[in-house]
Every structure is written in structure tokens, then in C-alpha cells.
Image: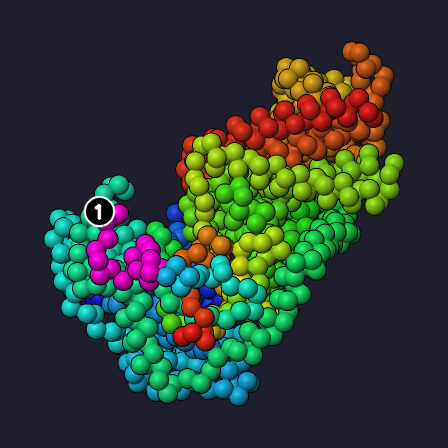
Amino acid sequence: MGNRRAATGIATVALIGNPNTGKSTLFNRLTGSRQRIGNYPGVTVAKKSGRMILDGREINVLDLPGSYSLAASSPDERISSDVLSGRGEEIPDLTICVVDSRQLARSLQLACQIADLGVPLIIALNFMDEVIASGQAVNATLLSQRLGVPVIPISARKGQGLDGLYSAIGECLETPVFLRTPQWPEYVQAATNVLRHQLKTNIHLSDAELRRILFDHRSSYLDLVGCPDGERKELVEKGRAPIREEGADPYSVEMVVFQKFISELLDGVTRADNHAQIQMTGRIDSILTHRFFGLLIFAGLMFLVFEAIYTLSGPAMDLIDSLFSWLGEVVGNFLAPVPVFQSLVCDGIIAGAGGVVVFLPQIFLLFFFVSLLEDTGYMARAAFLMDKLFGWCGLNGKSFVPLLSSYACAVPGIFATRTIENPRARLVTVLVAPLMSCSARLPVYLLLIGAFIEPVWGVGAASLTLFGAQMLGLFVALPLAWLVNRFIFKTPSQPFIMEMPPYRFPVPKDVLWRMWMGGKEFLQRAGTIIVVISVIIWALLYFPHKQGAHEEGADPVVQAEQIEQSFLGRAGHALQPIFAPAGFDWKITVGVLASFPAREVIVSTLGIIYRLGGDVEDSDGALADALRAERWPDGPHKGQPVFTLPVALAIMVFFAFCMQCSSTLVVIAREVGARYAVLTFVYMTALAWVAAVAVYQTTSLFL
Amino acid sequence: MKKRSQHNTEPAVPPSALENPKRRRTVNDLAPCEQAKVTAIHHDEGMGQRLMSLGLVPGCALQFVRSAPLGDPLMIKIPGCLLCLRRAEARLVEIEDEIAA
């Protein structure tokens, strides 16, 4: 392998392992706060990297996606095999394979595959604390002797055994160690030679890489050769001839060889299993996945999560709101001599920043609950319970996690679709994920529900409407996915195989960490763009400037005229006829137009339009009062309120469906291709308009 | 590769099934809590490989735990872990009664 670190001077260590082996916990332990989430927006998405300090030297740590095998059936596993083959951007000098001490036989299969590629490897035996606690044992020394590499017992969760791991990393970076690999039967070697001859390529593929192709004709190594999709299987099948002649099955020969090798290795090494844990998990499962109680608990939990977000985030949002109002006043007084500048800073920048920060309580809460559900193992049960609901439309239970994540934000949700092996199911999940009610839709729901539902029907109806608005996208997404699969992709059925992780107590530190990262990423990714857009919207409303309109205590009539003759006001007037069938006046139209780059700006835009400044909040009664007081100045409804219940509902439905998020479009384009980003934008916008018109027209008949 | 050689270990329909159709049982035929042993994994575009990488290998003991409330997918227990798979994939896992084995 040579010395790979020569290029940068910084050594790279990669972490790999089966899902649920505590790999991410170990990653957090090793990198501490020096972690940087490098999964946006480049191509090297699903791998995280961080820095650790070892003996005063900086080491780059890569956290590869959890996988069972290097047979690359999902994009995640493809990333791992690319990195390990030294064809990724960052080439690891050492790989740490994290294995579950209670599932050694299965965990070591992956280690064998990695070792076969000739990558230096050490093994971290995780969950040793639980093995010892249950009175069992794993003889790490014996296993290490047999494998020829360090085998370090650790507990990532409790931080035990890390010193041993550190010194093993240090030593193995100096002198690379290689795991003993099984002897391949002669017919496999023969097949490798046949395949090499068949491929006729200038690119050098090692025997191990050729074996990966032999065992799996969809392997990413075959991509290197540039083999057309249609010819792959036929070509590889020619290479497989010696295996078939021997009466062996090319698909299972690898596992058969590894299993035999591993069972010899483990003879006398381990008396550990997770029998007790599985039994406990089984008992909990008999309730949580119960035909009746399971579904009841699931529905209850989901409702509680959204209820908690609705009620808990309120006080924090009020606090942030008043903080930014105070800041606006202080800075405003200071800048009073220059009105243009004062208006830019107060109504544009500070208002925009306030509109970003105010999301944090909701995002923190959402990430908190999602991490909690995932870390306890409940998320897999949710997928199990829900699979049938998603299966019929070409998605699967695994779509549930990305779709639920999209409730926080479609951006991480779309990244999460990488865990879906089936490319079709993944693509369709990506296409419908933006329909999920992301947290950026909350402000407009909260504003309108607070102004028009709660005062009339009370808090119960308000919660229920919010719940309904949150579910709306999901109910539309599934039939839409079915239509796409049935008529566009014409795919018959999708596989769904998943391990149900044992129930575990979540590590509070990990949950808090993910919560923190969620908020931080939101501020970094969405925050800047929202502030920029706030300033643009401010400019479109400020110019062309009407004398005296922005002065302290300016005449409300002059102010109104200013908005009406501003650039955005003119655009709103011009496009209002398009939105008239949905009951929108030109002010709502302006708000809708301003929200296309990022829907979260709607509240601050409405605040500017209704002369309350951009730092209004949905929980702020002033904007709700202004909306309720708004009357049609002319036309057939002259003198009547603009915001009737049908209009409020139509706006909510419009925001539920419309593709008003530039970050999501960028991510879709990067993940599945620009044409799907265009498709998403067109279909969602069309859907939003049709739905808003339909809701306004029908509810107007009754309300 | 529709044509398969005689001594292929994983024919689309195992010879035993042709002789005695009753012998070819799959995970789909199990009742809740029933135990069995895996005899073969059939292949369907890499799906067999996926099942094997999860530990579902020939010779492995298996218990059908329950099906999801809506009938699909299924939860099965193999040594060391619980797996969830749909009936469409369970069809690929051929089993025999543990007593018979």
C-alpha cells in the first residue's frame, strides 16, 4: 500500500462497521468537539470527518456509513468501498473496524472483506462493558493472535479502553498491520484471471477488486472500467464460469468461505452473545410492535412530539423576539441620522437575522426527538409498523426516517435517503420529501392558526389544525409516489430488509450533540441566505423611494402608497390576478413571491408589508391584529376583511405544497440530478396553486 | 443467465421441490413463534447476498417472531439479531423444520 500520508502530512484513520455497533459514538469520543460535519454540499456527502490529537499530532478521522458488506447495494456502501479502495478523496492510512462483541461472527465478515482489499486494519471490540456485565467474555488476546492485528476491547459509550485504542492507532500508523485473510479456493483464483482477461482495460484492478466484481456484478469497481449497464452481468458471468463449473454459487461463495474462516477463528475465543438483550428487546417489542397497542403507541408518540414542539418552543421564541426588537430599537436610535441606512439595518438585516434565530427552539426540539427515537431503536420499529403504508406506493419503511427528518428540514431528510438501498425508492423519497411539513412552514401555520383558528375555536382546534397541516404533505406524498412509480418508472416491487436494533438507553451527550449540530447547520446553511433575502426584500420594498415614507411617525397613507409603488408591490399587483382564484390580495401575493427563495421569510415580509417592521413574530399579536384588520380597498369585496377563514386555509395549503426553498432545490440537484430539482419545483408549485384554489373555492361555499 | 447448469447449488426451483413439493417451505409458511432451520437462500438480483451479509446463512436457526400489524413485513429472529423483511424477500429463504433436521 505504501505510505499514503506523504501527500498531506496528516494521517487519516477511517472508522467502519455494521450499523448499530456504536461507531458514531466512538467517532464523537475520538474527535470530541473538533468534529466538522463535512456532508454539505459536495459529492462526498454521507461521510463525516473530524480531527483527533494523538501524542500532539493531528489525525484526520473519517466516519464511514454503517454497512454490512462491501457488496455495494446502497450509495452509502459505495462510499465506503470507494474510500477503502483508495479511490476516494481521502485515502485512509489505517482502518478501525468497530465490531459488536456479541455478534462477532457477523461483524467480522466486513473486516474480512476490508482486509481482503489489502487495507491496514485494527479491530475495536465495542460493547465490552455489556459483555462483562452479563458475566460473559471475549478473549481479545487470542483473537488478536489469530488475526494478526491488534484487537482492542472498548466501550465507546462509557469511554473505556480508549487508551489502548489510542496506542494501537499510534503504533499501527508507524507500522501498518494487515489482517490474516482466508485462502480463496483455486476456482475463485481461476475466475479472477478469466475476468481480468474479459475486462480488457488499462486500469489496474487488484485480485481483490476483481473478486468484488465477481461476487457482485453491481460493484462500484466495475464502474471504474466504464462498463455499460446492459453488458455488466453478461461480462461478469463469463468470469464466473470457473466457479459455476465447480458447482459453487458465485453469489454465496464469498460468505461460505468467510463463515468457515471466521468460525475457525472464533473457536474458543468467545462465549459472548446478546441473548439476554435480544430477549429483553423481544419483550418490549411484543408491546411496541403489537398489532393494536403498537400502532396506538406510535400514533400517540408522534402526536406528543408535535404537541411538545408547539408548546415548548413558544416561550423561547417570545424571548428571542423581544431580544431582537430591543436590538432593533437600540441600533435604530443610533443610526437615526441616516434614514436609508437605519431602515436597511433595522428592517432588513436585524429583522432578517431575528427571523432566522427564532427557528432555533423548534429545530433544537425536532432534532432532539428524532435523535431520541433513533438512538433508542424505536425508529426501526416505526419503519416496521409503517412499511406496509409506504410499500404499496413504491417506498418502504426506510423512507419513514428521511420523511420524518424532512419534518425538521428537507435538507437533512434528503441526505438521509442515502440509507435506502433501492435507487428508485430513494429517488421517489427525494421527490416527495420536500412535501413534508418542514419547520420553516411552522411560522406561517402558527401565525394564521393563532390569528384565525385559536380565537374562534380555542386551543384544542388550533392544535388539531396544526397537526392536520403537518400531515397534509404526507397524505398527498404517498399517492403521488404511487403515480410516479406506476406511470413514470414502472417499477414492480421494492425489497426491504433491515436489522431491528436492540433497545438501548440513548447517550444524552450524543442526543444533545446532534441537537446542537442540527441548529448550527441550520444557521450556517439557511441562516445566511435568509438574511441576504431579507435585505433584498427590504430593498425591493424601499425602492423606488417615496419622500417621507420611512420617517419616524410617517403618515400611514404615505407608507401604504410607498409599499404599493415599490418594486415588490408592483410585481404583486401584476401577478395578483393569478392568485385571485385562491382569494389572495396583492399583499399576500407579494408575500408569496418573496417566499420563493426561502419560505421562512413570509412572516417578516408580511411584517414589512403591514408596517410593523421585519422583526415581527408569528407569536406576536401585532401582526395577527393587522391581518384581522385588513380590508379590501376596492373591488367586489370592498370593505370586507381580506383574511377570511377560507383565505387563511388557502394560504396554509399553498405553503404546505409549494417548493419555496432554494437550499432544498440545491440539495436535490446535487443528490439525484438537476432535472429532478426542476421537476420538483414545477410539480410542487403547480400542486400548491391548484390546491389553494380548490380549498378557497370549496370552503367559501360553507364558511 | 436464464439457463442454469445442472450442478448449480442454487437452482431457481430446487430439485427436491420437484420430487416432493411439500418439502419446499419458506419463511412465509411459518406461524408466529415457530422455529426452523435455513436450508438455502435463493438469489434475486443481489438480494440473497444482502440476506447473507445480515447473517441469514444456510444452516442458521431461525424463529418467526411476528408480522407487522398490516400483515407485512415480518420480524424474524436469528442468533444475535432481529431482522425485518417483507414477504417478497422471505420467499427467498428456504427452511426445514428443526425437528426434521
Badge 1 amino acid = Glu
**Relative side of A390 to B17, left or right:** right
Write the residue at 56% across / 79% down: A276
Mark 1 falls on what kind of element? helix
Can residue A358 be seen here?
Answer: yes
Q: Main secondary structure of the magenta part?
A: loop
In the image, taking residue A303 as reference, residue A270 lies left or right, namely left
Above or below A683: residue A463: below
Camera-nearest residue between A357 and A276: A276
Q: Nearer the viewer, residue A47 or B73?
A: B73
- Residue positioned 23% across, 64% down in the render: A248
Magenta span includes A560: no
Label 1 sits on residue: A234
Q: Is residue A534 visible?
A: no
A697 over A401 or under it: above or below: above
Q: Does A198 appear above or below B16?
A: above
Quarter location, residue A689: top right
Q: Position of residue A191 (x, y in %)?
A: 16, 60
Dot 1 alpha-carbon crowd within 10 angstroms: few under 14, some 14 to 19, many 20 or more:
few
Q: Residue at x 76, y 35 (%)?
A: A448
Instruction: Give the magenta part as a residue range.
Output: B1-19
Q: Nearer the viewer, residue A653 or B96?
A: B96
Q: Residue at x 16, y 50 (%)?
A: A199
User: Horizontal and vertical percent for residue B72?
Assistant: 55, 54
Quarter of the image where the N terminus of chain A is located: bottom left
Residue B4, magenta (yes or no): yes
